[in-house]
């Protein structure tokens, strides 16, 4: 079982394994395929304000910046060690990304600050109550009509995936992965207040089924009245 630090579990459970994260994920999860699809589904434009929660080594942020050069892309992660890897990757590629060390269930951002929030392979690190607090935070920082795009372990879609998923449950704890593996993430999104929740794709990987989900923060009557002013708010609170 991964080593829970104060507030987060490191990318591969223990700090000593973090440098192996990129090669392992690339070899075992069809990483560029599923992250590319996640980005395509978000349909982001050049001026979008993007947050990647649990950004890890920054691969998703760098893919975004490669596609859309003027994007405002911010990565948040609890782990300084993994952020150092993300920073050196960005520097090597001369890409501008902002990286912030903070916990996903207590984010230092203003309300409605983002058009899209991404989370890849992060929610399964959290307990049920941390998942709920994190989704509430994501809901708060998204603008009305903004979208959440998630890639994470999902309900196994055949016997082989069920057997392979056992490794993830063993490594990342049965308790923390249960909502993922039992297909309960969409219900958690709906309970937070998101609408148009759907599972959009499933990928077979060496660690079981990896699912993509999307969900939208509703544009309520009140939000619509203020949508113009919210849209032009800067990220001053970020
Ligand atoms: C498996 S890695 C995924 C990294 C990256 N998103 C990806 O798709 O490759 C999970 C990341 O979530 C971060 N994390 C775990 N719990 C967290 C928390 N409570 N707050 C912020 N980050 C957290 C870990 O530090 C780790 O970098």
Image: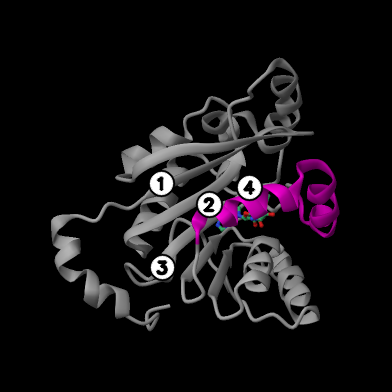
Q: CA distance from mark 2 to mark 4?
A: 17 Å
C-beta proximity under 8 Å, tags 2 and 1: no
- The quadrant in which the N terminus is found is top right
Q: Quadrant of ligand 1?
A: bottom right
Badge 1: residue crowd in 10 Å (few <14, some 14–19, many ≥20): many
- Image quadrant containing the C terminus: bottom left
**Residue drawn at the location 33% of the way across and 46% of the way down:** 194
What colour-coding does the image apply? one colour
Callout 4: CB less than 8 Å from ligand 1: yes
Where disc 1 sits, the SS reads: strand
Q: Distance of mark 2 from mark 3, alpha carbons?
A: 17 Å
Report the disc number at residue 114: 3
Q: Which residue is mark 4?
A: 121
Residue 172 appearing in the image: yes
Crowding at dot 3, Cα within 10 Å, few <14 / some 14-19 / many 20+, comes out as many
Per the model, the C-alpha gap separating discs 4 and 1 is 16 Å
- Give whichever of 47, 117 is nearer the camera: 47
Which residue range is magenta in the image? Answer: 14-43
Taking 85 as reference, is 220 left or right?
left
């Amino acid at each position: 079982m991964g080593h829970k630090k104060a507030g987060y579990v490191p990318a591969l459970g223990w700090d000593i394994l973090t440098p192996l994260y990129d090669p392992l994920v690339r070899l075992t999860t069809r990483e560029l395929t599923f992250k590319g699809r996640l980005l395509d589904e978000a349909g982001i434009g050049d001026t979008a304000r993007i947050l990647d929660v649990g950004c890890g080594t920054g691969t998703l942020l760098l893919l975004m910046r490669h596609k859309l050069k003027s994007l405002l892309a911010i990565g948040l992660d609890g782990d300084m060690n993994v952020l150092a890897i993300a920073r050196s990757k960005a520097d090597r590629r001369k890409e501008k990304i902002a990286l912030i060390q903070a916990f996903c269930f207590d984010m230092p951002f203003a309300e409605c600050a983002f058009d899209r929030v991404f989370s890849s392979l992060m929610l399964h690190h959290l307990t049920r109550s941390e998942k709920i607090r994190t989704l509430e935070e994501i809901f708060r920082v998204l603008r009305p009509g903004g979208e959440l795009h998630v890639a994470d372990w999902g309900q196994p879609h055949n016997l082989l995936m069920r057997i392979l998923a056992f490794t993830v449950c063993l490594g990342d704890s049965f308790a923390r992965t249960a909502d993922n593996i039992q297909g309960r993430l969409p219900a958690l999104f709906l309970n937070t207040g998101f609408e148009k929740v759907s599972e959009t794709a499933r990928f077979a990987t060496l660690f079981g089924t990896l699912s993509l989900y999307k969900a939208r923060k509703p544009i309520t009557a009140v939000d619509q009245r203020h949508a113009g002013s919210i849209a032009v708010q800067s990220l001053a609170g970020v």
